[in-house]
Amino acid sequence: MSHVDVVVVGAGPAGLAAAALIATTASVRVTVIDESPAPGGRLRAQIYRRNGSWFVGGDRARTLAHGARESGVTIESGCLVWSLDTRSASDRGAEAEVSLDSPPRFRLGISGGRTLTADYLIIATGAAETAYGLPGWTTPGVLAVGAVQTMLNVHRVLPGDRLAVIGIDPLSLSIVDELAAAGAPVQGVYLPPPSTATGPFTRPSEIFSRLAELRNLAPNRLLSAAMHVLRIPGITELVARLWPAVGVRLAGMPLHLRECVVGIEGDTGVTAIRTSRVDAAGRPMGREKVIEVDSVCISGGLHPLQDLTRDCVLVDIAELGGTVPLHGPDLETTVGGLYVAGNITGIESALVAETQGRLAGTAVAARITGRVSQADLESARTDVETARASAPISFMPRIVEGRHRMSELWAAHSTREATV
């Protein structure tokens, strides 16, 4: 068994930023645990346009990892956390200070049968892709967006010679841009079949409303202006009815907002997709069409990962992406000494995750040293809000409402705790 002052689980932008700040500010032992073979998280596979140029996530990941190591942080890649035991806040009190004579708050079981203990813990495990099924979705050659990104941007391998993308959301439109830049031939981007899993985003009118918020992803100013027009009340229903059957090209690829994929063909590998026209409400109609493809990319969105937060109070806030830990303005949870940062708190961009990591790191450093000022915490909070305001896209269309709801729930929780 070994002991460190702070453990960070997750070596994405949030975890690396938090670890580096704590090690630098508090001069304590910090270890980052991550199951991937190299630090950086999903950032390693991200390449997208920002302010007229390409943002290469792999470069940023290497910079963050180098900064953390230079600060004295130990990064254990390819290491899995398989258990977490916490001392509840009631055992000691959320605000109690850690002393050399007191037992550690956290005990983690990690790869190799090892045990690691810590006085403070930051969980920054990010998010996972949400899957939805349709006939043939387990056929070899059907991939999630993250897998396609990794093939393209990490391994430099094309997913196929003729690809179809299912799902129209920020993730799928991002991968379309990346596929176009890589010269990957894409047959088209299609709606998923209507189901409870895909929700309202199989209805063309809902998709058009979403596209209005994603105008920053448009490859040219003309299309961006057209997407901006979609914000006019009532216009989306009209556009949905008039959308051409052949689709409209986005980054050189047909965007089919009136056609959904109802099945995927193939035994040992993908050979084709079956599609159907849909009405303005997203209901399939008419005869099915068979389109030859050799690979399929399915985009179902993201949800926060909560594998290690069982001892925290969890709340379901759909606007944030699903179940998230109840947390305060400095990302502390209901378990004393346990903080969260990044997409585990709600689905946002890598830049927001990085600033959240610095906020959590500032809060932990303040608890350890007692020397971090309130002004430093306020500045870290402001940095998060600035990153949110400047984010090129919003993965959750009502994220502001979700954050407001989280603030209300935390205030109510704090009031109850104060009266006990």
Image (cartoon, grey):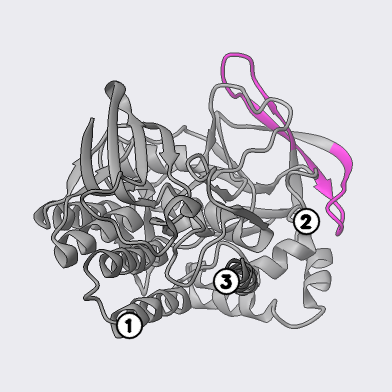
- Graded by Cα atoms within 10 Å as few (under 14), some (14 to 19) or many (20 or more), the crowding at tag 2 reads some
Spatial distance from mark 3 to mark 2, Cα to Cα? 41 Å
* Quadrant showing the N terminus: top left
Q: Is tag 3's residue or tag 2's residue first in the polypeptide sequence?
A: 2
Magenta span contains residue 280 = yes
Q: Which mark is residue 418?
A: 3
Q: Please state if 411 lies on the left or on the right of 379 as rendered.
A: right
Residue ID for mark 1: 374
Q: Which mark is residue 200?
A: 2
Q: Residue furthest bottom?
A: 375
The residue that appears at 39% across and 81% down in the rendered structure is 382
Foreground mark, 1 or 3? 3
The residue that appears at 54% across and 67% down in the rendered structure is 394
> What count of labels does the image hold?
3
The residue that appears at 48% across and 59% down in the rendered structure is 333
Foreground mark, 1 or 2? 1
Give whichever of 69, 165 is nearer the camera: 69
Choose top left, top right, bottom left or bottom right for residue 63: bottom left
For the magenta stretch, what is the residue range? 262-287
